[in-house]
Amino acid sequence: MPAVTVHYVGFHPSLILEGFNRIRLAYPIERVYLMYDSKPDRYGAVSRHNVKKVQEKLSFFSPVLVKVNPLSYSSVASALFVILRREEGKTVLIDVTDMPPYMAATAAVISTLFPNAKLYAARPEQSGEFIPDPDTPEFTDFLERKDNLTLQDVFTVEKPALAVELLDEEGREVDVLVALYTRNGSAESIAELVKWLGEDPSRAVVRATYSRLVENLEKKGLVEREQEGRSKRIKLTQLGLALAEAYVKLGAAKPPRPPLALKEASVL
């Protein structure tokens, strides 16, 4: 499937470009959108300066420039909605690397409205080198200097009022996630997963039931399947892993039943 990238350019254009180069190895990039800060302040000046650098480096893709106010919910949300609607049928990769927290939260909300949207961030190798050694007097002084912001306003990040019911808690979807979670996050096959859940993998109707369960979880982005020989390995995604861990912590997940012996003939 062709892909489109959307980047907000702030203080780290080089990191954005490095992230883009990594992403383009995995996706056939067809179009690039560059969002930048249109506010008449110093942050806007930085963004407008750096977006030119990214635009020049990615000139082969003829980037589409999109001006936004990163502190305005409606500005960010409407701009992203337009892009995502225009690019339906393509994978849209939204780069939150340089987004302020409020803008990134808004992007996350809008992305949930479109199944073709994905979020990603480029993580730098360096982290915290500018922070003094915690065992030195400079550390406390540094923290005092950094804690110098005063409140202007409090923003709320609005989201759809209808909650997304991602899991059928009355069925076995949660059990499947927890079974994978408690066994290093993956199963070699449907047959192995069925065995873990205490059912007989030699029965075709049982295998078919769990195949549909796994397929449904894959559509929801909670598991992924990888072909390995005659079978497909079933793995938790990061979201699936997080939800499974949460259910375990809440005590809401049923422990898997004792496994049955796995017959060779039942391997899918």
Image (spheres, rainbow, N blue to C red):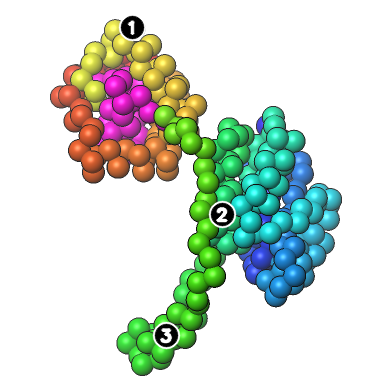
Front residue (pair 7, 111): 111
State which tag comes first along the sequence, 3 or 2: 2
Instruction: Give residue 205's mark.
Output: 1
Q: Are marks 2 and 1 in contact (CB under 8 Å)?
A: no
Q: Position of residue 113 (x, y in %)?
A: 58, 35
- At mark 1, the secondary structure is helix
Residue 11 in the image: above or below residue 184? below
In the current view of this chain or complex, which residue is farthest to the bottom? Answer: 137
Q: Tag 3's secondary structure?
A: helix
Q: Which portion, as a residue range, is magenta?
A: 166-195
Q: Nearer the viewer, residue 214 or 70?
A: 70
Q: Is residue 248 left or right of residue 4?
A: left
199 displayed left or right of 85 = left
- The amino acid type of the residue labelled 2 equals Ala
Identify the mark nearer the N-term, 3 or 1.
3
Q: Are marks 3 and 1 in contact (CB under 8 Å)?
A: no
Under tag 2, what secondary structure?
Answer: helix
For the C terminus, give its image quadrant: top left
Snapshot quadrant of residue 90: top right
> As drawn, which residue projects farthest toward the front?
153
Answer with the quarter of the image where residue 193 lies.
top left
Residue identified by numbered label 3: 144
Look at 48% across and 81% down and name the residue there: 148
- Residue at 57% x, 62% y is 100
Q: Position of residue 259 (x, y in %)?
A: 19, 23
The disc labelled 1 sits on which kind of residue?
Answer: Val
Circle 3 or circle 1, nearest the eye: 3
Q: From the viewer's perspective, tell me whether residue 58 is left or right of residue 154.
A: right
